[in-house]
Image: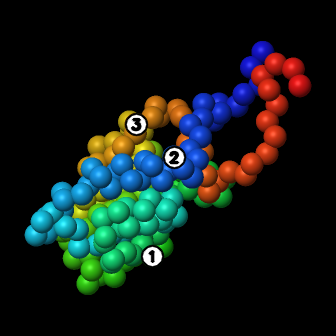
């Protein structure tokens, strides 16, 4: 008998793993910007999940200009809702997005990135993880997981005892 819930087809990401994967993403993005020498003008993190990867990428690429965009696309019960921009980055920084890296932890359905891409069509969109339904919204990513995989990020988890599959 299987007592697992459907969302337990999980991919558990530790702090060490998100750090390694974010550094790998920075390595892929290094010298790929449109600026002289392939530099990026700035980084915009999609809150909240994009904040940790954006911080790591900003450090690795020595980008000092970092802002956020807050997009709500799920309600408190994880029900999909219409994506709404709650806070936008500095318009002087953004322009049409040229030279800007937009960073998120994951693209799932692509709804969030679709809204942001319409606002900044020339920005470069990068995520650490990608699912098939949203992959076309991303320019660069590190790891693809199946659409039915639930990613457990370290900021969403707490350490606790887990029963073994057999026995106690």
In the rendered image, which quarter is residue 132 located in? Answer: top left
Which quarter of the figure is the N terminus placed in? top right
Which structural element holds mark 3?
A: strand
Looking at the image, tell me whether mark 3 or mark 1 is earlier in sequence order.
Answer: 1
Give residue 34's quadrant in the image: bottom left
Q: Secondary structure at mark 1?
A: strand
- Between 41 and 123, the residue placed more toward the observer is 41
Q: Which residue is mark 2?
A: 17
User: x%, y% of residue 160?
Assistant: 79, 45
For label 3, the residue is 144
Coloring basis for residues: rainbow
Residue 57 visible in the picture: yes
Q: Residue at x 19, y 59 (%)?
A: 31
> x, y percentage for residue 146?
46, 31
Tag 1 or tag 2, which sits nearer the N-term?
2
Graded by Cα atoms within 10 Å as few (under 14), some (14 to 19) or many (20 or more), the crowding at tag 2 reads few
């Amino acid at each position: 008998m299987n007592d697992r819930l459907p969302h337990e087809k999980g991919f558990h990401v530790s702090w060490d793993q998100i750090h390694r994967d974010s550094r790998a993403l920075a390595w892929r993005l290094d010298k790929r910007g449109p600026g002289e020498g392939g530099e990026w003008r700035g980084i915009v993190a999609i809150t909240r999940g994009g904040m940790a990867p954006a911080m790591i990428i900003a450090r690795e690429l020595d980008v000092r200009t970092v802002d956020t965009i807050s997009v709500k696309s799920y309600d408190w019960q994880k029900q999909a809702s219409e994506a709404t921009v709650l806070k936008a980055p500095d318009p002087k920084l953004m322009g049409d997005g040229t030279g800007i890296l937009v960073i998120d932890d994951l693209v799932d359905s692509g709804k969030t990135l679709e809204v942001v891409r319409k606002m900044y069509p020339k920005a470069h969109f990068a995520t650490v993880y990608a699912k098939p339904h949203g992959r076309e919204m991303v320019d660069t990513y590190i790891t693809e997981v199946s659409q039915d995989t639930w990613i457990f990020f370290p900021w969403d988890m707490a350490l606790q005892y887990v029963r073994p599959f057999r026995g106690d």
